[in-house]
Image (cartoon, grey):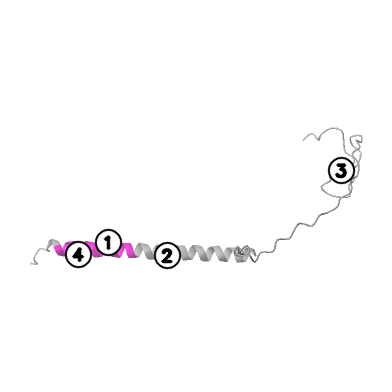
Amino acid sequence: MTAPASSESRTALFVALGAGALLLCGLCGLFAAAAGALYFFASARSAGTGPIIVLPAATATPRPPEALEIPIEGFQHVQPGTPLTYSHYPPSSGAHYPNPMVS
């Protein structure tokens, strides 16, 4: 027959079990985070996008957008059903029907 365990040894056992459980949960969390990061970078690489890299403002060189000159092609109304052609798409001017399109 064995002697009953003292309350101090039971307390030490529960503290050790609790610490082990916390350590195991922490390791599982780290593993899950690493797996998620690997999945993110692998999927970004297979999509051809890669990770987003933000450059500091000092190294970024802003470029103004290039202006595109589009001539005005008039604003005349034509009969509905008349075929229309434009030199630029989407058109910003030109012949058009007098009423909006019915969808």
Q: Mark 4 or mark 3, which is nearer to you?
A: 3
Q: CA distance from mark 3 to mark 1?
A: 75 Å
Residue bearing mark 1 = 18
Q: Which residue is mark 3?
A: 93
- Frontmost of labels 3 and 1 is 3
Q: Could you tell me which residue is drawn at 13 percent across and 61 percent down? A: 7
**In this view of the protein, which residue sits in the foreground, 5 or 59?**
59
Task: Pick the quarter of the image with the N terminus.
Answer: bottom left
Residue 77 vertical placement versus 37 (above, below): above
> Where 38 sits versus 86, above or below?
below
Q: Which residues are magenta?
A: 8-23
**Whole-percent x and y of residue 5?**
12, 64
Q: Amino acid at mark 1?
A: Gly
Q: Any mark on residue 12, and which?
A: 4
Distance between mark 4 and mark 1 Cα atoms? 10 Å
Q: Amino acid at mark 4?
A: Ala
Residue at position x 29%, y 65% in the image: 20
C-alpha distance separating marks 4 and 3 = 84 Å
Q: Nearer the viewer, residue 63 or 19?
A: 63
Q: Residues within 10 Å of mark 2 (few under 14, many from 20)?
A: few
Query: Majority secondary structure of the magenta segment?
Result: helix
Q: Secondary structure at mark 2?
A: helix
Distance Cα–Cα, label 1 vs label 2: 18 Å
Q: Earlier in the sequence, mark 2 or mark 3?
A: 2
Badge 2 vs badge 3, beta-carbon distance below 8 Å: no
Residue bearing mark 2: 30
Of mark 1 and mark 2, the one earlier in the sequence is: 1
Secondary structure type for disc 4:
helix
Answer whether residue 101 is magenta in the image: no
